Every structure is written in C-alpha cells, then in structure tokens.
Amino acid sequence: MKQSYFALFLLTISLGSCSKDGENIPLVLEGEYRAAGTVLAANPIVMYTSRGQIDNQAVIDRYLKRHARYNPSFSRTNIIFPGTTTLAIRANNKAALISSYQTRHDTTEAEITDRTTDYFVLANLDSVGPIRKPFSIKDGCSMLADRIKVAYPGERCRPDSSFFSSSCKNRPVRVIRIQDEKLFIPQFSWLIRTATCGITQSGEWNLLDSAVLGQLRSGDTLVVQERQVELLKQ
C-alpha cells in the first residue's frame, strides 16, 4: 500500500513538472501571416493625468470635443483595415512585410530585434533618409512623445552644411503584439496635451509604455487607445 501511495506521489510530481515546462515553451513565430480585414476595437479609449486614470467615456468624449483639432482616429467600433498585409517570418529572426493598397505594392525586409512575452519588434534592415531636422529645444509634448511608446526607430544624425539643422537617418520599427499565442498588428492612437502644446498620432504599429504614466505632471493629459488587427497564420 505504501508503495502505491509513493508511485502516485511521483506521478503527480511528474505531471506537474511537465505542465510547468510546457508553459515556458516560447511561441514559434516562423511562418506566413495574413492580416485580417478588420481593425478590432479591442481596448477602450483611456485618459491619463497626473492624478491618475480616467475611464469614464462621457468625460473623455467631452474632452475630445473641446480639443477636436488635435483628435486622432479613435473608434469604439470595428473598422476596415485597408489593403492587404502579409508578414513572413523566417529563420534567424529575419522577416519580410508585404503590403498592397490599390495599385501600390511594397516589400520591406526586416528582422526581429527585440522580443518579450507580450510583443516583438520588427526593425527595417535598411535605414531611411537623409532627413533634415532643425536644431530646436523640445517642448513638453515632444518630450512625452519620446517616451510614450515601447519601441522607437534607431537614429543617427550629424550637423549639415547650414549649421542650423542636422541630417539624420533612422531605422523604422514596428511592434507586433503577442496575445493568447496569436499575433496582432497594434493600431496605437494617442493625444498629448500640456498647458502650452498639443500633439497627436493615429494607427501606429506600437504599444503604450506604461512607465510614461508616472512622468505626467500637473496640466499634462494623455488620451490613448490600442486597437489591433489579427495576423492569421497561413
């Protein structure tokens, strides 16, 4: 009888160990994915201030109405994702992004440069530019915009011949969300307002970096929404 109990005890430990190991197996990304035709309003519009989070949609709507000229493309309903997008993930973290819209067809070679349990970052293999940027002191909106997202393009700049601006090249990045062992294209829209400025952006392939919420000061307002498009494995 003791031997039977001991055998049952060993079996229980073994099954528990297998389950735990299985949970740590990373999702295999390699394959070809086609973007679904719908942008899912998966998450609500949320407002943040230095005093905390605001979820009341009526309050948010009144705020957006007052600042309509800054409004990005928020939506509480599903909308059409334009064109067709295919993501092919290959061995050694290499990838290709193929997009088509009307008569335009583009292929971007990329690679996975960073990965967490919640997302991975696709960076273009080639940089773009040169882009001329004037030397200037950043306002509060621009400084918040530099911290709002989980991934930013790598950038290299040097002074140009005018001495009043710089010539820059950057390496564009896109974020792909991982959720319930599925892949999604984020559609991140955001609005930043301070006492002196406003800035907005719609439909970025990126995600909110929650660390920025602790850096909001009195008078700062941040409104965000993270919608998404599912990538269907072919």
Image: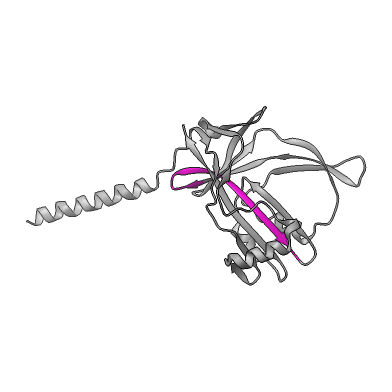
What's the residue at 61%, 38% (across, down)?
Answer: 82
Q: Nearer the viewer, residue 148 or 233?
A: 233
What's the residue at 71%, 59% (across, down)?
Answer: 192
Q: Position of residue 144 (x, y in %)?
A: 71, 59
Residue 92 visible, this angle = yes
* Rendered view: 24 above or below 142: above
* Rendered view: 103 above or below 66: above
Can you tell which quarter of the image residue 125 is in? top right
> Does the magenta portion include 184?
yes
Outermost residue on the right side: it is 162
Q: Position of residue 54 (x, y in %)?
A: 60, 67
Residue 115 visible, this angle = no
Q: Position of residue 195 (x, y in %)?
A: 77, 67
What's the residue at 20%, 51% (across, down)?
Answer: 10
Q: Nearer the viewer, residue 82 or 175?
A: 82
Secondary structure of the magenta portion, mostly? strand
> Does the magenta portion include 52?
no
Q: Which residues are magenta?
A: 178-194
Quarter of the figure that contains the N terminus: bottom left
- Rendered image coloring scheme: one colour
Q: Position of residue 61 (x, y in %)?
A: 64, 63
* Rendered view: 31 above or below 213: above
